[in-house]
Amino acid sequence: MKKSLFVTLGIIVALFGIVYAFIYFVTYSDGIRSGELIKISHKGVIIKTWEGEISQGISGAQIFSFSVLDKDKEVIEQLQEHQGQYVKLHYVERFATFLWLGDSKYFVTKVELEQSPHFKN
């Protein structure tokens, strides 16, 4: 009886580990999006995650929501510094996410300041 319980628990833990590794390390797509950075916040009650949004249109009709992992401190600092400016975001898309990673499936990995196409000289 004890042996079958330990085997069952071991299988459950191994399956969870495989699913977690798949979601964390395997990306569905990657790409670049540009827009005006309109929000970056550290939100949550028990588990805090970094969440942000860029507006990809003049009127804000197209919003791209993204998350940033806590380990990417440089990206978080750059986003806070460039609040309200036009930025280019490099991101990876995962198949799914866990609540402690972020709200979005899109995770920003790099930030570049860019000149707005609406106000070119």
Image (cartoon, rainbow, N blue to C red):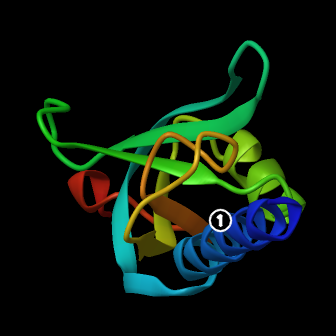
Q: From this viewpoint, which residue is outermost toward the top? A: 45
Left or right, residue 11 beside residue 117: right
> Which quadrant of the structure image shows residue 40?
top right
Q: Nearer the viewer, residue 81 or 19?
A: 19
Badge 1: residue crowd in 10 Å (few <14, some 14–19, many ≥20): few
Question: Residue at position x 35%, y 64% from top?
Answer: 34
Left or right, residue 60 beside residue 31: left
Residue 107: percent from left, percent from top: 54, 63
Question: Residue at position x 44%, y 71% from top?
Answer: 94
Observer able to see residue 113: yes
> Which quadrant of the structure image shows residue 2?
bottom right
Note whether 7 is above or below 82 in the view shown.
below
Residue 73: percent from left, percent from top: 88, 58
Number of disc labels: 1
Residue 26: percent from left, percent from top: 52, 87
Q: Nearer the viewer, residue 109 or 102?
A: 102
Question: Residue at position x 70%, y 37% from top?
Answer: 49
Left or right, residue 86 beside residue 13: left
Q: Amino acid at mark 1?
A: Ile
> Which quadrant of the structure image shows residue 28?
bottom left
**Quadrant where the C terminus lies?**
bottom left
Question: Residue at position x 76%, y 73% from top?
Answer: 7
Left or right, residue 80 beside residue 68: right
Observer able to see residue 111: no
Residue 98: percent from left, percent from top: 57, 49
- Helix, strand or loop at mark 1: helix
> Which residue is tagged 1?
12
Note whether 6 is above or below 102 in the view shown.
below
**Quadrant where the N terminus lies?**
bottom right
